[in-house]
Image (tube, helix red, strand yellow):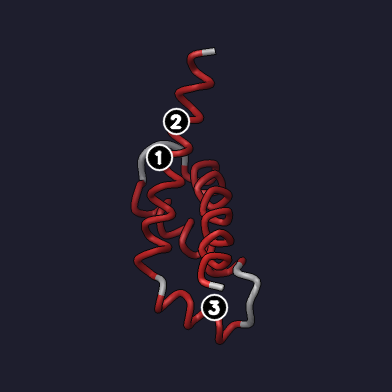
Amino acid sequence: MFRSIKTIIKNLAQNAVLIAEEELGAGNGQAKKQIAIDYIIKNLPFSEPIKHIISFLLSKIIDDLVETAVEWLHTQQQNQGEQ
């Protein structure tokens, strides 16, 4: 179960980072990170009380997955720039 929640969060994190980047553009790292975290929690496929518990218990994992998604986005942008 934990593995599937982590996979869900990872996928949401990638979408969240793309959305935050579109909304705020370059810079504003902390604001974009908060947008991404809020997006993930909002879009978890669970009831509101469960979302709250997950966000509290897994806050470090959510944070790490957002950071990983940011690195993924930068890699994608670099790869597109090389083509």
Q: Residue at x 45, y 23 (%)?
A: 78
Mark 3 vs 2: CB contact within 8 A: no
Residue 64 coordinates in the image, percent (x, y): 37, 56
**Foreground residue among 56 and 33:** 56
Residue 33 coordinates in the image, percent (x, y): 40, 54
Q: Secondary structure at mark 3?
A: helix
User: Toward which corner of the image does residue 51 lie, by quadrant?
Assistant: bottom right
**Foreground residue among 50 and 30:** 50
Q: Amino acid at mark 2?
A: Thr
Q: Quadrant of the N terminus?
A: bottom right
Mark 3 vs 1: CB contact within 8 A: no
Which callout, 3 or 2, points at the residue further toward the start of the chain?
A: 3
Q: Which residue is mark 1?
A: 71
Above or below residue 56? Residue 30 is above
Above or below residue 67? Residue 6 is below
Q: Which residue is mark 2?
A: 75
Q: Residue at x 41, y 60 (%)?
A: 34
Q: Amino acid at mark 3?
A: Lys
Q: Secondary structure at mark 1?
A: helix
Instruction: Give the number of callouts.
Output: 3
Residue 15 coordinates in the image, percent (x, y): 58, 49
- Label 1 packing within 10 angstroms: few (<14), some (14-19), many (20+): some
Q: Which label belongs to residue 51?
A: 3
